[in-house]
Each structure stands twice: as structure tokens, then as C-alpha cells.
Amino acid sequence: MKCSVTFVTCKNARQAERIARALVTERLAACVNIVPKVTSIYRWKGEVCRDTEAMLVIKSRAAKAKAIERRVKELHSYELPEVIHVAIAGGSREYLRWVGEGTR
């Protein structure tokens, strides 16, 4: 079983927690870390913007990546939410097994 980590930025901790709870409750993710108060500097519609956001670090099966993306887009307030999937090349076998069991 292949696992992945998905990164999603949210407008605030409240939105981040709502999305994280939904993903874990629906077994799309085994665990979601919420990193509060990340500073994001980006270009949007021709302007350089700076915002304080919350970052989700979502651990799941790689096969659930598309479903996670769909669900994040349903729950997110941004016009274009950041959803980046990264394959996990290795790690604790026991932890990755736990990720798999949590997303059955």
C-alpha cells in the first residue's frame, strides 16, 4: 500500500479544523495535523499578497488523493484552494500500516 501526504492551506484555524475533522471522520485521512499561523506570500490576480493561514498536513493512502481533493474543494472557501499531494517514499512501517488501517 502506498501512502501520501497532502498539504492544504486554510483561511484560519476554524476552517482547518472543520476540514480535518471531516477527512478523518470520513476515513479519507488517518491523521491531519493543523499548523496554525503560517505566513503565505503569493501572487493572486496580478497582486502580491500576504496572509496568515493555517496549514493542513494530511496523511492517507495515495489511492485516496483524488477523493481528498474533491472533499477539500467542497468544504473550502477559497476560489482555488491549495491541494498538493506528495508520495511517501519511506517511513516507519508500523506507522504507514496504521495510516492504511485508518483509511479503510
Image: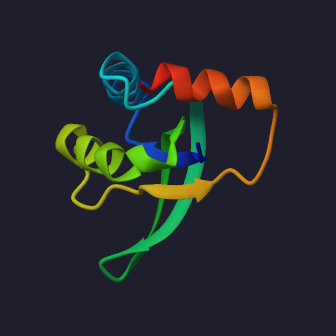
| Residue depicted at 48% across the width and 42% down the height | 53
Is 98 rendered above or below residue 68? Answer: above
Residue that appears at 46% across and 46% down: 9
Res. 89 visible in picture = yes
Question: Outermost residue toward the left?
Answer: 74
How many callouts does the rendering have? 0
Q: Is residue 93 above or below residue 25?
A: below
Quarter of the figure that contains the C terminus: top left
* 46 and 88: which is toward the camera: 88
Dividing the picture into quarters, in which one does residue 13 lie? top left
Asked whether, in this view, residue 21 is left or right of residue 86, the answer is left
Colour convention: rainbow
The percent position of residue 62, horizontal first and vertical second, equals 50, 49
Residue drawn at x 51%, y 40% is 61
Q: Residue at x 58, y 27 (%)?
A: 99
Q: Quadrant of residue 76?
A: top left
Looking at the picture, how far across and down is residue 95, in whole percent?
72, 25
Please identify the quarter of the rendering in which residue 38 is found: top right
Relative horizontal placement of residue 76, taking residue 65 as reference (left or right): left
Q: Nearer the viewer, residue 42 or 62?
A: 62
**Residue 31 visible in image:** no
Residue 58 percent location from the top left of the image: 52, 37
Q: Position of residue 43 (x, y in %)?
A: 44, 75
Which quadrant: the N terminus? top right
Farthest bottom residue in view: 46
